Amino acid sequence: MAIALRTIVVPVSPTVQIAKVNHAWEYHLQAGAGVVMDSDPSKEYEETANKAAGLARALDLAESAFVAH
């Protein structure tokens, strides 16, 4: 069994030609935590928020590096 704790999903239609896309990309960020019996809910929430923030920062950096403004 595997748990995806940090995931970025970029849905793209199989018929889309990437080079001709002229609209904004859509991203879905997902973050989670492994909750166990002695987990502290507030700490798990904070950990999950930090993971999501890291994913968002990675997308910001990628956009600034690869997207012409």
Image (spheres, grey):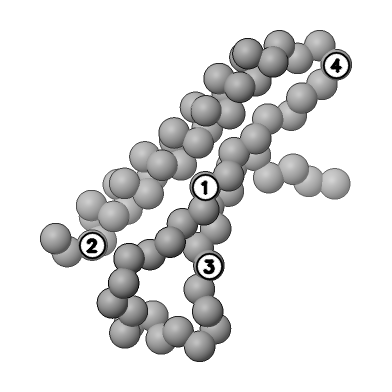
Total numbered labels placed on residues in the image = 4
Relative to 37, 28 lies left or right: left
Q: Quadrant of the C terminus?
A: bottom left
Mark-to-mark CA distance, 4 and 3: 35 Å
User: Do the CB atoms of the residues marked 2 and 1 lie less than 8 Å apart?
Assistant: no
Q: What residue type is labelled 4?
A: Met
Residue 39 x/y as whole percent: 75, 14
**Crowdedness near tag 4: few (<14), some (14–19) or many (≥20) residues, C-alpha within 10 Å:** few
Placement of 32 over or under 65, stated as above or below: above
Give the distance between the C-alpha atoms of the residues marked 1 and 3, in whole angstroms.
11 Å
Position of residue 48 in the picture relative to residue 1 (left or right): left
> Does 28 sit above or below residue 55?
below
Q: Is mark 3 on a helix, strand or loop?
A: loop
Q: Mark 3 points at which residue?
A: 11
What residue is disc 2 on?
Answer: 67
Spatial CA distance of label 2 from label 4 is 44 Å
The answer to the question of whether label 2 and label 3 lie on touching residues, with beta carbons closer than 8 A, is no
Please say if 23 is above or below 63. Answer: below
Residue 14: percent from left, percent from top: 54, 83
Q: Label 2 to label 3, Cα distance in Å?
A: 18 Å
In the image, what residue occupies the spot 53% across and 67% down? 11
Mark 1 or mark 4, which is nearer the start of the sequence? 1
Pointers 4 and 1 in contact (C-beta within 8 Å) = no
Residue at 49% over, 27% down: 50
- The residue that label 1 is drawn on is 29
Q: Which amino acid does label 2 sit on?
A: Val
Few, some or many C-alpha atoms within 10 Å of disc 2 (few <14, some 14-19, many ≥20)? few
Circle 1 SS class: strand
Distance from the alpha carbon under mark 2 to that under mark 1: 19 Å
Query: Dot 4 corresponds to which residue?
Result: 37
